[in-house]
Image: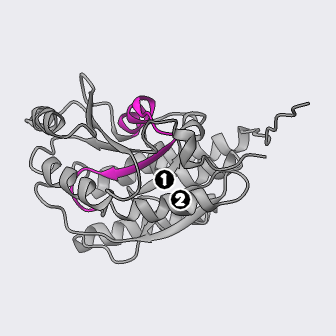
Amino acid sequence: MEHPVKPEDAQGGPLLSLVIAVLNEAENVEAVTADCLAQLAGIGPFEIVFVDDGSTDATAQVILDLARRHPEVRLVSHDRCCGKSQAVRTGVLAARAPWVGTLDGDGQNTPGDLGDMLALALAAQGRRPLVAGVRVRRDDPWPRLVATRLANGFRAAVLNDHCPDTGCGVKLFARDDFLRLPCFEGMHRFLPALFQSYGHPLINHPVTHHARLHGVSKYTNFGRAVVGVGDLLGVIWLKSRIRAPAISESRP
């Protein structure tokens, strides 16, 4: 039977890695970093791993400047835009902590929510959970709210994943568990279904949500819908093919 990683298992390194995938967010990353440093100061050692997914603005340079001032900040870069799912995976691969929390890079999330989510994960019994943020009150334009509600309802009906807001960017999980999942573009929207298919429990946790600080979303509602249908069909197929036993090790 698996048990949650305890703080002492970090062995002197960070306990939590924040993975933040960014694409052309030069106007937002400094404020996001300041929020992370202020709101997570009491949880123990942590790092902030920004993954620049081929930005064409000054995002990477701003993050490098932040890294010079704050040892918690790291930058990993793609040579071209590979999509959010690959950017998140790149960040998890680079993470040095046993637990990983994800945030969006536009300032819409509250980093402090991850402290509560980490406490829930550490207190869980049995297999390590995925703790998924659920935006109780979203601060988004109404067309996006309507599109997301329709997409969430359709996805939940098809996959029965028990998560009312799988599109929320705030999630927390064990690094090793995430890296056992199949990787494909769009997987970040299906983490509850994938984790549960591999035998991990789901904990939904309410999180706060804000309006985007600067700039615009990199995805349109139509684009999300078109890509999402294909991804959904793929996840249905993956779930039908996954055989994931619980693994235990016996010692004399």
Residue beneath the point at 70% across and 51% down: 127
Looking at this view, is 87 or 40 the one in front?
Answer: 40
Is residue 197 on the magenta stretch? no
Q: How is the image coloured?
A: one colour
Horizontal and vertical percent for residue 25? 15, 45
Which amino acid type is marked by label 1? Leu
Residue beneath the point at 51% across and 39% down: 10
Residues at badges 1 and 2 in contact (C-beta under 8 Å)?
A: yes
Q: Is residue 104 above or below residue 187?
A: below
Q: Which mark is residue 131?
A: 2
Left or right, 160 with reference to 169: right
Q: Residues within 10 Å of mark 2 (few under 14, many from 20)?
A: many
Q: Residues within 10 Å of mark 1 (few under 14, many from 20)?
A: many
Q: Residue furthest bottom?
A: 137
Horizontal and vertical percent for residue 165? 46, 65
Q: Which mark is residue 172?
A: 1
Residue beneath the point at 22% across and 71% down: 141
Q: How many marks?
A: 2
SS for tag 2?
Answer: strand
Could you tell me which quadrant the C terminus lies in?
top right
Toward which corner of the image does residue 91 lie, by quadrant? top left
Is residue 99 on the magenta stretch? yes
Residue beneath the point at 44% across and 33% down: 96
SS for tag 1?
Answer: strand
Left or right, 167 with reference to 182: left
Left or right, 70 with reference to 115: left
Q: Which mark is residue 90?
A: none
Q: Is residue 163 visible?
A: no
> Mark 1 or 2 closer to N-term?
2
Which amino acid type is marked by label 2? Val
Residue range highlighted in magenta? 85-108
CA distance separating discs 1 and 2: 5 Å
